[in-house]
Image: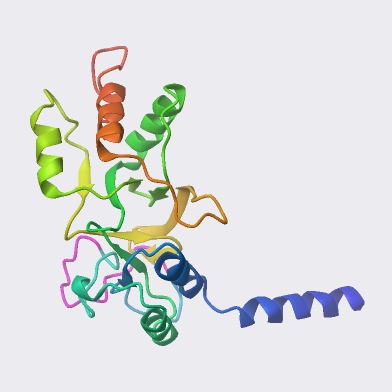
Amino acid sequence: MREILGRRRRLRFRRKRGPAQLEAALTCAAEWQWPVLPGVGLKAAGGRSDRGRACACPDPECVVPGAHPFDPGILTATTDERMVRWWWTNRPTAPIVLATGGRAPCAVSLPAVAAARALSVLDRMDMRLGPVVATPTRWSLLVAPYTLEQLGELLFVKDCVPSSLRFHGEGGYLVLPPSEIGTGPVRWERAPLPGSAAPWLPDVEAVVDALVEASTSAPDGGSRLAY
């Protein structure tokens, strides 16, 4: 009987803590100074978060269901704790969207299968990585802020860059854990170290250089970063 009562108390305590999105959004905004805002989310379906649901935005053909800003728009992203609390108190299950660029982290993303291969290669190269965000379809390597001009100069001098790479820089956004989007849950493949003032981030040039090397080092001469 005591064991059952203790279990019930623990369950009540966990419920009182509230949804994980609020806690995570506050960590990003207040502790790390990353500007965030709630994503559009998914359409309700019997009160459950079923995978594959349609986006809550007006576009019936939305290609990134739940995984983008809508109302509020990307320009409202903030580090203000009061605003973040208000947003997620009213929309407790809303995805956490990071506004990339400026002083905020940027990212380089690639398909999930290719990313898993790339991370194995980068680990063998002793490449130091920052946090890595994973969805069922794509993984994103967070990098230090860069400008569009810096990215352009970086890519211009490369003979070849894997076409599967996407860049999330100024004016862009990225969904952070723990969120639920149309393709499934968003999680940390490489989580930020706990207790740090803000996660360490590598330079985009170092990450792109390492990814290009990983891509061109396949034994058959092909690309390790193909879909």
Residue 224 in sight here: no
Q: Is residue 178 visible?
A: yes
Q: Looking at the picture, how far across and down is residue 33, in whole percent?
A: 38, 65
In the depicted view, which residue is nearer to us: 122 or 83? 83
Residue shown at 74% from the left, 75% from the top: 10
Q: Is residue 59 magenta?
A: yes
> Taken as a whole, is the magenta stretch helix, strand or loop?
loop
85, above or below 150, in the image: below
Q: Is residue 1 above or below residue 208?
A: below
Residue at the (39%, 79%) spot, across then down: 84
Snapshot colouring: rainbow
Percent x, y for residue 21? Answer: 46, 71
Quadrant into which the C terminus falls: top left
In the figure, 153 relative to 81: above or below? Answer: above
The answer to whether 149 appears left or right of 36 in the picture is: left
Which residues lie in the magenta part?
A: 50-64
Residue at x-position 45% and y-position 28%: 123
> In the figure, 113 relative to 78: above or below?
above
Q: Quadrant of residue 58?
A: bottom left
Q: Position of residue 177 (x, y in %)?
A: 43, 60
Which residue is located at x 79 percent, y 74 percent? 7
Q: Left of 122 or right of it: where is 108?
A: left
- Foreground: 103 or 92? 103
Assign the N terminus to one quadrant of the image.
bottom right
